[in-house]
């Protein structure tokens, strides 16, 4: 019989072999992804919750890596701390949505993914928190595991009057109402250095020292007032008191003048020169003619939504605080002065100026004059 000849490879076999190779490569690549993506997520976001299935771990890891930017960076690096409250029984979805709507995080969905991935979704605490959009969302998630910190920050700005300080209380995290705070500040201060020369009718207006205070959440109104006043009292150093005396001013008079300078000056560097103008006027018997004293007397401007009406158009308002009508200092401070304003009174510039007005280029600076004629010439065209 004739020898059989081997058949050549079929076209079908030639096609199957490369396809199998591609399938193997695809399987290897997929296996690499299944391994590498969760590993990358764990390196970036920490260990996943043991409650997750393998599929859940992979899908959540992939989502987190895609959303990495919105989870590891704060939404606003300059944001100040603000209160945030979680209600009892509130869902993770609701909490995440409110965090986004209130500006703490950029993406509620990315935040929810991280909570589920990390297992923190089951341990969010109801209560009061102090959060900041400067924090990365992953840190906000950690912060929400520990409700109601023992202390909260409370800020007082230089140039604020008592009502402006009280307005910050409802959102501060402190359990003090504006009404209780104002009632505590209307009493006459006792046993402080700054009470020297203080009339019996004076209150704590002007003596709530500016700054940020870390305060117990349950602090009482009287204790808050004592804390702010105590910080003010600590600034009354011997050199400052001697400086006031050299200007022939009691501490109370000096603080009253400093409170006016605080509202007049935009730049701290100009405060000693502005102080010299007012001291020159007091020495010569001239009225101070200070707009902030009228603003203080006018009270809250509902149209402008401010306690400091600007510009001042009526200098005839009937008030003992109006230094356009009454000579000398007003009966008490009109705002809380900074240490820079207090030092400006104690150590003023030595000038012959009696007048000043805002510079025309809107720089925040002032132009000064010796005579009224020079002052009029400095008016903006």
Image (tube, helix red, strand yellow):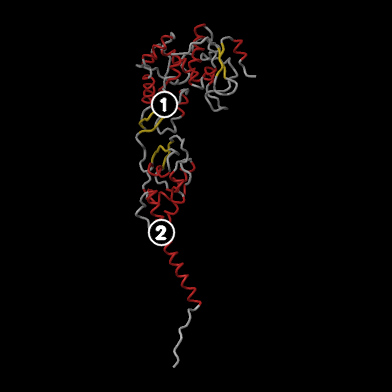
Q: Nearer the viewer, residue 90 or 268?
A: 268
> Is residue 205 in view from this perspective?
no
Where residue 176 appears, x then y in whole percent? 40, 30
Q: Secondary structure at mark 1?
A: strand
Work out which residue is located at the far top of the displayed protein and give it: 284
Q: Which residue is found at the position 43% from the left and 28% from the top?
A: 155
Kindly identify which residue carries mark 2: 34
Kindly indicate the quadrant of the structure image that contains residue 246. Answer: top left
Q: Nearer the viewer, residue 326 or 281?
A: 281
Q: Nearer the viewer, residue 138 or 35?
A: 35
- Say if 58 sits above or below 203 in the image: below
Where residue 5 appears, x then y in whole percent? 46, 86
Q: Secondary structure at mark 2?
A: helix
Kindly identify which residue carries mark 1: 211
**Going from the N terminus, do you reach mark 2 or mark 1 first?**
2
Whether label 2 touches label 1, CB < 8 Å: no
Crowdedness near tag 2: few (<14), some (14–19) or many (≥20) residues, C-alpha within 10 Å? some
- Say if 26 sits above or below 266 in the image: below
Specify whether 153 is left or right of 10.
left
Q: Nearer the viewer, residue 334 or 203?
A: 334
| Image quadrant containing the N terminus | bottom left
Kindly indicate the quadrant of the structure image that contains residue 25. Answer: bottom left
- Say if 186 sits above or below 5 in the image: above
């Amino acid at each position: 019989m004739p020898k059989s000849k081997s058949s050549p490879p079929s076209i079908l076999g030639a096609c199957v072999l490369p396809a199998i190779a591609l399938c193997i490569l695809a399987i290897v690549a997929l296996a690499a992804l299944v391994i590498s993506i969760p590993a990358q997520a764990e390196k970036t976001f920490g260990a996943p919750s043991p409650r997750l299935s393998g599929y859940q771990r992979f899908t959540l890891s992939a989502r987190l890596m895609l959303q990495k930017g919105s989870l590891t960076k704060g939404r606003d690096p300059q944001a100040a701390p603000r209160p945030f409250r979680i209600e009892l029984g509130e869902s993770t979805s609701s909490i995440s949505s409110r965090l986004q709507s209130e500006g703490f995080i950029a993406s509620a969905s990315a935040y929810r993914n991280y909570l589920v991935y990390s297992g923190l979704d089951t341990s969010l605490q109801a209560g009061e928190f102090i959060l900041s959009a400067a924090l990365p969302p992953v840190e906000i998630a950690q912060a929400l595991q520990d409700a109601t910190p023992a202390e909260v920050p409370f800020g007082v700005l230089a140039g604020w009057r008592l009502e402006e300080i009280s307005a910050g209380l409802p959102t501060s995290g402190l359990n003090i109402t504006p009404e209780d705070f104002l009632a505590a500040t209307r009493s006459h201060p006792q046993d402080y250095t700054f009470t020297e020369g203080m009339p019996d009718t004076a209150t704590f207006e002007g003596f709530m020292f500016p700054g940020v205070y870390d305060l117990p959440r349950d602090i009482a109104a009287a204790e808050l007032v004592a804390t702010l006043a105590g910080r003010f009292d600590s600034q009354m150093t011997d050199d400052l008191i001697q400086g006031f005396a050299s200007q022939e001013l009691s501490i109370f008079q000096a603080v009253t003048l400093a409170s006016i300078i605080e509202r007049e000056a935009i730049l701290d560097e100009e405060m000693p020169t502005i102080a010299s103008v007012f001291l020159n006027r007091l020495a010569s018997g001239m009225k101070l003619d200070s707009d902030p004293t009228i603003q203080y007397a006018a009270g809250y401007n509902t149209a402008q939504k401010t306690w400091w009406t600007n510009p001042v158009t009526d200098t005839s308002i009937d008030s003992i605080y109006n230094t356009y009508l009454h000579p000398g200092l007003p009966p008490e401070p009109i705002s809380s002065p900074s240490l820079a304003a207090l030092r400006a009174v104690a150590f003023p510039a030595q000038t012959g100026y009696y007048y000043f007005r805002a510079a025309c280029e809107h720089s925040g600076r002032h132009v000064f004059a010796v005579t009224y004629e020079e002052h009029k010439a400095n008016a903006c065209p």
